[in-house]
Amino acid sequence: MSEMWVNMGPQHPMTHGLWNLRVKIDGEVIVDADPEMGFLHRGIEKICEYRRYNEVVTLMDRTCYVAGLSWEHVYLMAVEQALGVSVPARAEYIRVMSHELQRLASHIMWYAAFVQDIGLMTPFLYGMRDRDLILDLLQSYTGARMTYEYMRVGGVRNDVPVGFTDRCRKVMDWLEEKIHDYEALCDRSDIFLKRTVGLGILKAKECLDLGVTGPMLRAAGVPRDLRRDHPYSAYPELDFVIPTHDGADVYGRYRVRMEEMRQSIAIVRQTLEWLDHHPGRVLAEKVPRFVGTPTPPPGRESYILRRGYPKGRGFAAIEEPHGEALAYVINEGAEHPYRVKFRSPVMVNIAAAKDYLVGYRVSDIPPIMGSVDICVGESDR
Amino acid sequence: MAATSAPPPPPTPPPAAVKKTAPAPGPQGLAGLVVIPMATAAKQFVKSLWRPSTIVYPYERLEDPEFRKRVAVQSGRPIGVGEVWDNYRGVHALNIATCISCNLCAFSCPDVCIEMVNVDLGNGKSKKCPEIDYGKCSFCGFCSDACPEGCLTMTSNYTITTNHRSEMVYSPQRMYSIYQTKLPMNPIRQERPVNEDAILLDQDLCIGCNACARDCPTKCITMIDIPKPQPKPGEKLPKRIWKEPMVNDADCVRCGTCISVCPKECLYWGAHP
Amino acid sequence: MTVTLYDVAYWLSSHLVALATGTSASNLPGGPWTTAAVALAWLVTGIIVFAASLVNTLILIWWERKLLGRFMDRRGAMHVGFAGLLQNLADGLKLFRKQVFSPREADQFGYYLAPTAYMVTSIILLGFLPVSTGFVGGSVPLSLLLALAIFSFAPLFIFVGSWSSNNKYSLIGGMRTAAQLVAYEIPLLLAVVSVVLLTGSFDLTTIVMDQARYGWFWLPLILGLVVFSVAMLAEMERIPFDLPEAEAELVEGWSTEYGGMLFAMTMLGDYVRGLVGSYLIVLLFLGGWTLPGPLAPLAAFPLGGIVWFQIKTYLVFGVFIWVRAALPRVRTDQLLQVGWKRMLPLSLANIVIAAALVVWGWPHLTWPAL
């Protein structure tokens, strides 16, 4: 049989979302790959220009449906820089804790979907079960399970409830135990190793050339992690380790994520310890009016011109579960951001698909693309 | 990066802590082929034989505290301790009695799903209260955050299944009946940032028409008399009522109603005096 | 000679015909009347086998759903019928009520033929597999050979279906099926050869009776049992060898384009093949409907044989479900490597063992004086 193009997507079990991977196959071997993105483009960056600063937070949750709090965090860091708002320390710690819980949830979700791609459905259910506990935790202080809308300009909406830290510690203990189960089903299974080791190799240099970040980069042996390299929020005061792997393959990405989950648990425990001993405000004392309360409907906006609000620009970068997420906010003195720009790590990681797919087999596409940790909502925005 | 207001400056980042994870283990023989994975699955099988972790949703509900306790005990999962549902953002509850019709909830709604409708209070009186379309609502909770009186809160009720879209529009009375059921309610936001801005007046433009004071939901604006200046010869005094609004800043909820009703656009947001 | 289901049906139908023609059942008038009696008997047998296999398959799917659920810390079907027992029936009815359609560019004949033939050939198998002494649709002296022959029809129909669907996923799935089933057919047959060597018969009833007399074959032929089970897993297209319908990359493999009733037929065919596979393992290696010596009285009640046979079958299938819960899917090349490089030598070694046992005078082993 001669070569042929096969569309994997937009509706396809491998895609985990709405995107199209066109692969050219020769028998079972991939000779070319061409990812097509943009099916889920909702124009979030443009919508941001018509929403007040706080209201954009509702869009951030919808940007990535598995890591909403991370996106809220990066957006608000940029906004706070642009508006010159300072954040109380307790809020920073709560944000870091939320961010790490979100990373745990995202990695567990990744694990569940990834292993199901290889044909093992059991860990999918295990992963969903354990992720549910994290969602319970997040719900207990943010008020929702997926669309949190929790962070605000100048801090977070409310403090964690009484008894939260103990509950959280229990869940962390449970998760630490369950990660062993995950590994027993994967690391100790020869079939799993056969399906992952030496596949989808993307070496360190190629990663850096293509802008690939996150666990994919660390699996290639580059210890780059913004939490340590460009520390933000409360991370400078926390102690954690950056796992790397030499393989640059699917197995390495799996390994790195598993270790990152352990590190996230450690970070959450440290933040819980801190939160126990440092009560205080979680929202800035003073924020610009257009951030604090809303304004009358359009048509009566001439008053805005009466006062020159401070202009500014904000830039923030965080280590999101999928990679490095960047946000850039331009504040022109209005109550809406003038322009918001996001950099999604997933977009870049998928765009490099050709470099790590060619030469492998059709059966390898699900594990390789699964190991990228795709969240289309985030890459298409 | 956003500056933290934490008292001590952040210490220098810890030295590079990098940990190389173990390389992939080699073939593990029969143990790796079948024994260990199957033993792991069997372990879970034995554990979930009596009670799997799933919740049989319509019959068992996570917000039921009795059930939470039972599940935590039976399935061994660390759930169900403590009141998890206090913060939940579900269907709104509205206390009509304390609503001041300030419109802030409708203003703050990113989805534009809140409309202020007239509520008949009996004895010929009526006032405007929010009516929410749950077909549009995204349950972000900005409305209850914005509510200055704490009369619009969110409950732990999340079942809004209906047969028709029009039934998803909840009238104020319906939300009041939810309020009366005393479900666990989202507490009023604990901390509200102080606004930097206040209502300021451009005295040259004001005509003393009383519109702002009339429409102020908190009645924090009073019209005070101002002296009528003596016109110089040849000068024509502006045609106006010689009164001026004065805002009681402590009571002001900064809803901006006065600004939007002012016919001369003489009220504006300004720096806090 | 055992009395089969067909014999009973023929007895009934011949008496019916005798009643209609006014003769005695022992010497019917020849010609169309005898033909009618035979046809009626086959029809009745077929309907009973079909109904029994359908019910059995539905219960098997239920068993898989429940068991897999527990492995995954969930419950499985639980609402329709007692503990969800009727859920599969409801699913099946829903599928059968759906519109039957085919892709415009598909080869219509092949498209409709494939699932039909796939299901029918699977169900025919159950017609001559004995489930207990005398409980068999039709008595065939070479039933084992016939069963395996019909069992290996499936790749042909799968390939026809995959080609006619005019879909790239289907095509790749069909290719994989062909490669996989051919690769595993050989170890499967070689494993069966060892059993035949020990019994000297292709009749499944004889094989079971031999086991009842001399001990079950799994002990001397443990290698054969392993090879047969693994090959059977591949033949049933179940995880870890479900490459033909690897849903992660090939959507649903060769049955991607099938919907509604046609899909239900492929699904049913799959599970009937699963049932047949478990039956064969029980029949060939695990003593069929018999129980080992001291436990034999437990099967002495009426229909006891059938009950034990079913219990064994479900336990065997339970192991397959367990495997499904614990192991991921292998890759095509790895699958073929396992088939050709591991299973084939193992099955050959198994034959050597069986042959040696026969040489040493199985079942009464006399060690040769060396």
Image (cartoon, helix red, strand yellow):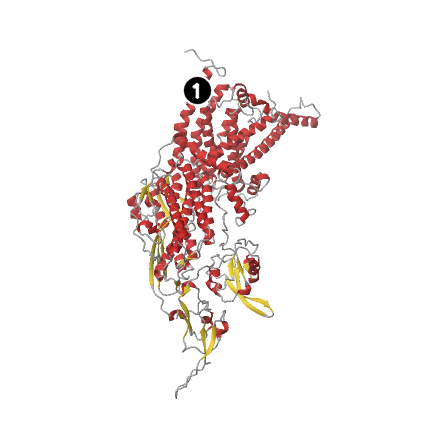
Closer to us: C125 or B99: B99
Could you tell me residue C219's position as x and y percent?
48, 22
Q: Is residue C310 left or right of residue A212?
A: right
| Residue lying at 44% horizontally and 75% vertically, measured from the top left | B264
Q: Eyeballing the image, is A331 above or below C72?
A: below
Residue type, label 1: Ile
Q: Quadrant of the N terminus of chain C?
A: top right
Name the chain letter of the residue that bears numbered label 1.
C
Disc 1, SS: helix
Q: Quadrant of the C terminus of chain C?
A: top left
Quadrant in the rendering for residue B117: bottom right
Could you tell me residue C130's position as x and y percent?
56, 26
Q: Is residue B42 left or right of residue C78?
A: left
Q: Is residue B207 visible?
A: yes
Q: Eyeballing the image, is B109 above or below C86?
A: below
Closer to us: C17 or A200: A200
- Residue on which disc 1 sits: C353
**Within 10 angstroms of label 1, few (less than 14), some, or many (20 or more) residues?**
some
Outermost residue to the top: C369
| Residue lying at 34% horizontally and 53% vertically, measured from the top left | A232
Outermost residue to the bottom: B233
Could you tell me residue B156's position as x and y percent?
52, 54
Could you tell me residue A291's position as x and y percent?
41, 63
Q: Is residue C126 visible?
A: no
Closer to us: A109 or C339: A109
Q: Is residue B135 left or right of residue A307?
A: right
